[in-house]
Amino acid sequence: MQVSLRLDGDCVRAFHIALLERLAALDDVELSVDAKPAGGGIPRSAAALFQLETAIHGLSHDGLAKRVPFSALAPYRTQAPASPDLVVDLCGDVELDGVRVWRITYDRASGEAALLALILAGRTPLARIEENGVAIAAGRLGTEYGGIALASFQDMLARTVSLIVAAMTGTAKSVPDLPEPAQPNAPPMPSAGKLGVRAGKALARRIVQKIYHLCYNAPHWKVGWRQTNGRDLFDLRAHPASGWQELPDDGSRFYADPFPILYQGKLTLFVEDYIHRLGRAIISAVPFGPAGPIGHPEPVLDLPYHLSYPFVFERDGEVWMVPESCANGTVDLYRATAFPGGWVKEATLLSGVVVSDATLVEHGGAWWMFATVRDGGGAFSDALHLWSAPDFRGPWTPHPNNPVLIDIASARPAGRMVKRGNDLLRPVQDCRRSYGAALGIARVSHLDLIGMEQVVETILNPGALWSGRKLHTLNEAGGFEFIDGSAIAPRWKRRVRD
């Protein structure tokens, strides 16, 4: 198939080269580039904002937004055929009779300036690949760097590459409908004056952040718990009227990602135990009695790299754990030899991939692993990948349609999946406002080697009954239910535990 990529030759970016490399690697694709000047690109004032953000936030100079010389297109044919089989139009200006054209839009507007304008307006862009005005693929793009225009822009360019490649391979899907605030389709690019004001505010905000970090341990998370009395959040779809009790910490650390397990009649809660002075987390555990925690969480797994999301489960009479270890580029399986401690590594399930919050479930005669993947850079939370295996020990095979979902509002796992009758319910993170800002409950309507479909039925936010600024994880066991979210812990209140 002859494919022509239409891009603006006046502004060739590393993003374009990354996209060309991914497309050229596909089977049966003969690639060319249409790089005529397009006009209407990002104004110079925005480039100045990017330069300032790079300096004050310590961003890389070699990201996907980096401008590269026109000669970087030399490995690719720059004379497009008169009648290609398909044109991938990044500029929104291709009009060819009798030729298939895929137009890439962001909230129905074309071009990188449209994407940046949405970012500057604080919007969550809906990227679409449109053919004759009809969306053939779509994804809700995200970032963990809200408020930093350049980092957000580069994250979303990376996921645009993922979406286009998925459409080319026939694996791309649309995104589930979610409530969106009423808003115009395409905000205008701010004027140079307004961008200058934004740059000044960015610098002032960075200074405030530096001062804040001298006085506070930030971010600081907290774990909430309660007795369900037979009705959990999957039933209530709202915070319980009784609210939540908090798992106390000593201020020198925080607890997050609560995973309880009922084993041999006793309830134990595993948590990410983030130690501020180390700048990384270990896995700790605390027993629970009828009235709540008995003592404080104690370390059970400490490795040279950051650990979180201690996905624990019982199988074959033993307890297993798959903690997040994306800092190590692996997904590893551990077994407890002296529960709740004595963890030994049994297998590396995946390697060479940046995987977040791996969540396992047995369904339809197979084991499935749900996780978000930082595909080609970009956000950690908006591209859902699946793997399947005959046994939880593996071997794990990637789903042929990965990524099965691109959606910052419902891709990333937020806890164990649960079965209610014939229904498979999945906690998800809604990161549209920021990482881990809200918690969704999705019903998985289809899951097999053809694909995965889900419908987000409920979105829970922090509020009067959960005073944290975020709501991030949901798990239950033994009649207790656990959530987590963010709080603030001043350093001057810090106490060191004996």
Image (tube, grey):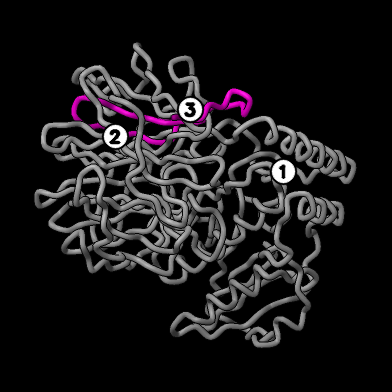
Kindly identify the residue that appears in the image at 74 percent across and 34 percent down. 211
Q: Secondary structure at mark 1?
A: helix
Within 10 angstroms of label 2, few (less than 14), some, or many (20 or more) residues?
many
Q: CA distance from mark 1 to mark 3?
A: 38 Å
Quadrant position of residue 392: bottom left
| Mark 1 closeness class: few <14, some 14–19, many ≥20 residues within 10 Å | many
- Residue at 34 percent of width and 24 percent of height: 225
Regarding mark 3 in the picture, which secondary structure is present there? loop
Q: Does the rendering let one see residue 185?
A: yes
| First-in-chain label (1 vs 3) | 1
Amino acid identity at mark 1:
Leu
Check the picture and name the quadrant holding the C terminus.
Answer: top left
Q: Nearer the viewer, mark 1 or mark 2?
A: 2
Tally the numbered discs: 3
Residue positioned most to the right: 193
In this figure, which residue is indicated by the disc labeled 2?
A: 269
Residue lying farthest front? 498
Stretch in magenta:
470-498
Residues 449 and 208: in front is 208
Left or right of 176? Residue 122 is right
**Residue identifier under label 3:** 250
Locate residue 489, reporting x and y percent. Answer: 57, 27
Q: Amino acid at mark 3?
A: Asp
Residue 391, above or below 381: below
- Mark 1 vs 2, N-terminal side: 1
Confirm whether residue 136 shows in the render.
no
